[in-house]
Image: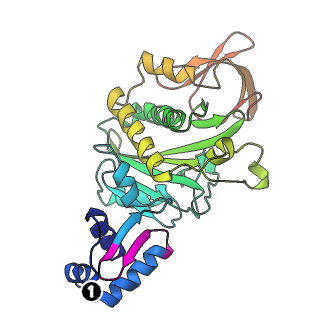
């Protein structure tokens, strides 16, 4: 009911009387008054004037679908948009919707994640309204072997959106962390449901640290947020809509492929290339210099004996970063 009231008020040009709202929505004026008070408590600014009614003055700054939709300029991604107050993991929630046949481009965002998942079995918890945590479901006509470009393309798009919106000098730590200096700002976890020869859907889950003022002790040396870096609170809804637009444009423009130009663009803002790196091969730690990115997104590493090793997943430690 609260959604319907906001929808009605946001479409109105000025005040709407309690009587009109109650007639249109089929509930008593007393009930409308209660819903309006609940909305005010949750951050909506609504002007109420006797004999005139109610007028929506502003929407809350926390993630909400009405505000996001106002800013959203995409054609596909986020046209089916669900914003939850709290969820275990947006990836898991969207997986269920994916199995039920939700459309290409469906986005699930949450103000809080209680069982958020990171890469390599790690956790990605988000306290209410600290981060922008969301997942996008894509149904590309690709074979499972052709999807490797999606994560770097999404990483590139998110990095460009943050640079444009915040003017922060963020970079990509291969494969898809976004960092500022030595600290992580964004993590991306991509999961896939596929048959032998066709992808059913891909879910790309993205966590952006936005309003954190501190992090748990164990990660505080290697995590940061937009607020910590800029000292300013951004409009989360406008920024989120901007991120979705960048992702859609990148995926449409590239048709899910890493062309030479895109690899060049990625390399320019990749903090890994040119640095000493270390990664695990079985039980051994391998050291080398990151020499570049391959056309399938793999990291090319030059080893000390002159041989070249291609890394396609896992954790790569970059000297001087993490
Ligand atoms: C990582 O860097 O380890 C990846 C972190 C991915 C976190 C995001 S938050 C939204 C989505 N839902 C999840 O459970 N995880 C991803």
**Height in image: 181 above or below 59?**
above
Q: Quadrant of residue 249?
A: top left
Image: magenta residue range: 41-54
**Residue drawn where x is 64% and y is 48% of the image:** 227
In the rendered image, residue 47 lying in the magenta stretch gets the answer: yes
**Height in image: 246 above or below 125?**
above
In the rendered image, residue 57 lying in the magenta stretch gets the answer: no
The residue sitting at the top extreme is 306
Q: Quadrant of residue 182?
A: top right
Residue 193 at least partly seen:
no
Q: Quadrant of residue 57?
A: bottom left
Give the structural element (helix, strand or loop) at label 1: loop
- Percent coordinates x, y for residue 98 in the rendering: 35, 55
For label 1, count other residues whose C-alpha is less than 10 Å away and answer few (under 14), some (14-19) or many (20+): few
Residue sitting nearer the eye, 97 or 310? 97
Q: Is residue 194 left or right of residue 163?
A: left
Residue 28 at least partly seen:
yes
- Percent coordinates x, y for residue 181 in the rendering: 70, 32
Residue sitting nearer the eye, 151 or 230? 230
Pointer 1 residue Cβ closer than 8 Å to ligand 1: no
Q: Is residue 165 left or right of residue 247?
A: right
**Residue drawn where x is 39% and y is 32% of the image:** 250
- Percent coordinates x, y for residue 216 in the rendering: 75, 56
- Percent coordinates x, y for residue 187 in the rendering: 58, 44
Q: Which residue is mark 1?
A: 27
The residue sitting at the left extreme is 23
**Height in image: 292 above or below 78?**
above
Q: How is the image coloured?
A: rainbow
**Residue drawn where x is 36% and y is 75% of the image:** 2
Q: Quadrant of the N terminus?
A: bottom left
Q: Quadrant of the C terminus?
A: top right
Number of marks in the rendered image: 1
């Amino acid at each position: 009911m609260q959604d319907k009231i906001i929808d009605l008020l946001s479409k109105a040009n000025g005040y709407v009387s309690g009587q009109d709202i109650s007639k249109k929505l089929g509930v008593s004026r007393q009930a409308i008054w209660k819903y309006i008070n609940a909305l005010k408590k949750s951050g909506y600014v609504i002007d109420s004037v006797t004999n005139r009614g109610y007028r929506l003055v502003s929407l809350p700054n926390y993630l909400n679908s009405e505000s996001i939709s106002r800013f959203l300029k995409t054609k596909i991604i986020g046209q089916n948009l669900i914003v939850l107050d709290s969820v275990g993991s947006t990836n898991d929630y969207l997986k269920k919707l994916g199995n039920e046949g939700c459309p290409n481009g469906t986005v699930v965002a949450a103000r809080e994640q209680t069982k958020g998942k990171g890469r390599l079995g790690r956790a990605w918890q988000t306290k209410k309204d600290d981060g922008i945590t969301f997942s996008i479901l894509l149904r590309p006509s690709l074979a499972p072997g052709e999807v490797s470009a999606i994560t770097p393309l999404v990483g590139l798009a998110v990095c460009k959106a943050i640079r444009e919106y915040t003017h922060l000098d963020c970079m990509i730590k291969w494969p898809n962390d976004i960092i500022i200096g030595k600290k992580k700002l964004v993590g991306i976890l991509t999961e896939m449901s596929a048959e032998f020869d066709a992808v059913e859907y891909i879910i790309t889950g993205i966590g952006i640290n936005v309003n954190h003022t501190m992090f748990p002790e164990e990660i505080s040396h290697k995590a940061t947020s937009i607020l910590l870096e800029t000292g300013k609170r951004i409009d989360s809804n406008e920024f989120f809509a901007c991120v979705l637009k960048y992702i859609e444009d990148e995926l449409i423009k590239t048709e899910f492929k890493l062309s030479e130009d895109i690899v060049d663009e990625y390399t320019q803002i990749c903090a890994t290339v040119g640095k000493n790196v270390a990664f695990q091969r079985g039980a051994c730690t391998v050291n080398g210099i990151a020499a570049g990115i391959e056309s399938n997104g793999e990291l090319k590493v030059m080893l000390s004996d002159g041989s070249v090793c291609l890394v396609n997943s896992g954790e790569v430690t970059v000297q001087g970063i993490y």
